[in-house]
Amino acid sequence: MRSSNPVFSRRGFSRDNGGYAGFNAGPQAGAATQGNPYATNPYAEPTNPYAANPYATGGPDLQHGAPQAPAQPGRMTMDDVVSRTGMTLGAVVVAAGLAWALELPVALGFGAGLVAMVLGFIQAFKAKPVPALILGYAVFEGLFLGVISQVYNNVAQGAPMQAVLGTTAVFVGVLIAYKTRLIRVDRRFVRFVMAAAIGFVLLMAVNMLFAVFGGGDGLGFRTGGLGIVVGIVGVLLGAAFLALDFKQIEDGVRYGAPREESWLAAFGLTLSLVWIYTEMLRLISLLSSD
């Protein structure tokens, strides 16, 4: 996994500073929660004293048995999420297409990847989403993806298109599994995914250091049979992050998150899809070389 994807550190709709519903969200100042059957955080356990949801103002959601915020001006809707995600992914695709068509040098592509990493981390740790940062990340990440896609295509002809199809299949599969509740996002799921992602990133960083200073393939986590196993783990982690994204979006819409949070949802989805795509590229190239 590339370090330019800070997905493992993003906070979604959870804000520790009295903001939005999430795993650490406490009751909003002055909010009446006692006696309100719809004021519970769907992430929280029943015994959690911080389970109040600051968004809960409406009646029950008939499908999920959870609160559904009435449509209000300035509140996030699914249309907002779809349109922002379309803009962000569109910027990635257009930039990648330009990088491919112009045959940008590899060094320039990795420079763009470095810029994308910086912009991504800045946004990940900001209190509010900044559309300019998110779109800037998308453009530079797209340039990077266009360059490495061409490199992988030279190694394994057709690998980029196969990676796109594979990423799409993972997205659709996780969405269906989430909507049918085959995947249930709860506290335990989030703790496991975050711990696995941090361990995965640290392991890949150590492997890269050994490769840079020791030469060769480092510890061998990106080549041969072990590389295939690591690639599969990387794709599965990306799929788990998609499930977290879907949960954050569902709760943001249900509880009336501010409309600006749709940019954060688009950012999270883009990070997860980029993660899956890059892991797919590596995995396909390894499978093709065997």
Image (cartoon, grey):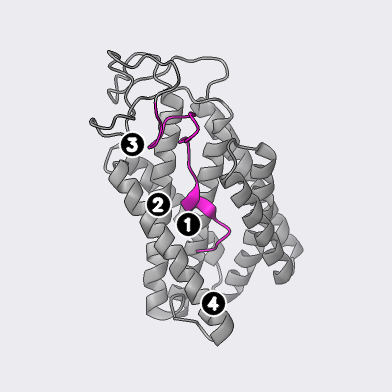
- Mark closer to the observer (4, 1): 4
Q: Which residue is mark 4?
A: 209
Helix, strand or loop for disc 1: helix
Q: Is residue 84 visible?
A: yes
**Contact, CB < 8 Å: mark 1 with mark 2?**
yes
Kindly report the distance in space between the C-alpha atoms of the residues bearing marks 3 and 2.
14 Å
Residue flagged by tag 3: what amino acid is it? Lys
**Earlier along the polypeptide chain: callout 1 or callout 2?**
2
Residue 276 numbered tag: 1
Asked if the magenta segment contains residue 17, the reply would be: yes
- Give the left or right position of residue 36, taking residue 84 as reference: left
User: Looking at the rendering, which quadrant does residue 263 occupy?
Assistant: top right
Q: Position of residue 118 (x, y in %)?
A: 65, 55
**Contact, CB < 8 Å: mark 4 with mark 2?**
no
**Earlier along the polypeptide chain: callout 3 or callout 4?**
3
- Mark closer to the observer (4, 2): 4
Residue flagged by tag 4: what amino acid is it? Leu
Q: Position of residue 83 (x, y in %)?
A: 58, 33
Kindly report the distance in space between the C-alpha atoms of the residues bearing marks 1 and 2.
7 Å
Kindly report the distance in space between the C-alpha atoms of the residues bearing marks 1 and 3.
20 Å
**Earlier along the polypeptide chain: callout 1 or callout 3?**
3
Q: Position of residue 283 (x, y in %)?
A: 45, 68
Q: Position of residue 139 (x, y in %)?
A: 68, 50
Q: Which residue is mark 3?
A: 179
Q: Which residue is mark 2?
A: 239
Q: Tag 2: Cα neighbours inside 10 Å, few (<14), some, or many (≥20)?
A: many
Q: Tag 3: Cα neighbours inside 10 Å, few (<14), some, or many (≥20)?
A: few
Range of the magenta residues? 1-26
| Depth order, front residue of 77/86 | 77
User: Looking at the rendering, which quadrant does residue 34 occupy?
Assistant: top left
Residue flagged by tag 1: what amino acid is it? Ile
